[in-house]
């Protein structure tokens, strides 16, 4: 995963760190990965499909909320992902 952009979601009841990867190719389509982290729990999804691909510690209801968040914030998340230069992130250049 490329360098992550941290977005604090202050519109929710709690603050959680949401990390976005750079754009890559998945199954022949452009995609990016989004991870939410909260007190040792993690969940990862792929956009634009908003498909959750891993979950450690979040309930089914929280997974549904994360999917809704991804759909609602998709343009913002895609913009963040497109702004990440994967090679610069790999080389730890800013």
Image: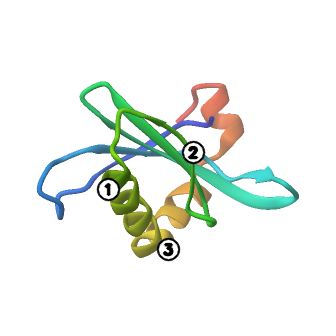
User: Furthest-front residue in view?
Assistant: 60
For marks 3 and 2, the one nearer the N-term is 2
**Which residue is at a point 53% across and 66% down the rendered structure image?**
79
Residue at which label 2 appears = 21
Q: Which element carries disc 3, helix, strand or loop?
A: helix
**Which residue is at a point 55% across and 65% down the rendered structure image?**
78
Quick one: 84 or 78, which is closer to the camera? 78
Q: Label 3: few (<14), some or many (≥20) within 10 Å?
A: few
| Position in image of residue 71 (x %, y %) | 46, 72
Q: Label 1: few (<14), some or many (≥20) within 10 Å?
A: few
**Which residue is at a point 39% across and 69% down the rendered structure image?**
68
Q: Tell me: 6 left or right of 74.
A: left
User: Furthest-right residue in view?
Assistant: 28
In the picture, residue 5 is in which quadrant? Answer: top left
Tag 2–tag 1 contact (CB < 8 Å): no
Residue at which label 3 appears = 75
Q: Which element carries disc 1, helix, strand or loop?
A: helix
Q: Which element carries disc 2, helix, strand or loop?
A: loop
| Disc sitting over residue 61 in the figure | 1
């Amino acid at each position: 995963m490329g360098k992550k952009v941290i977005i604090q979601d202050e519109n929710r009841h709690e603050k959680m760190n949401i990390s976005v990867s750079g754009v890559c190719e998945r199954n022949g389509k452009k995609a990016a990965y989004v991870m939410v982290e909260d007190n040792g729990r993690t969940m990862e999804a792929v956009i634009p499909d908003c498909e959750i691909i891993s979950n450690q510690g979040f309930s089914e209801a929280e997974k549904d909320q994360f999917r809704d968040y991804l759909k609602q914030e998709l343009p913002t998340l895609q913009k963040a992902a497109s702004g990440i230069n994967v090679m610069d992130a790999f080389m730890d250049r800013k």
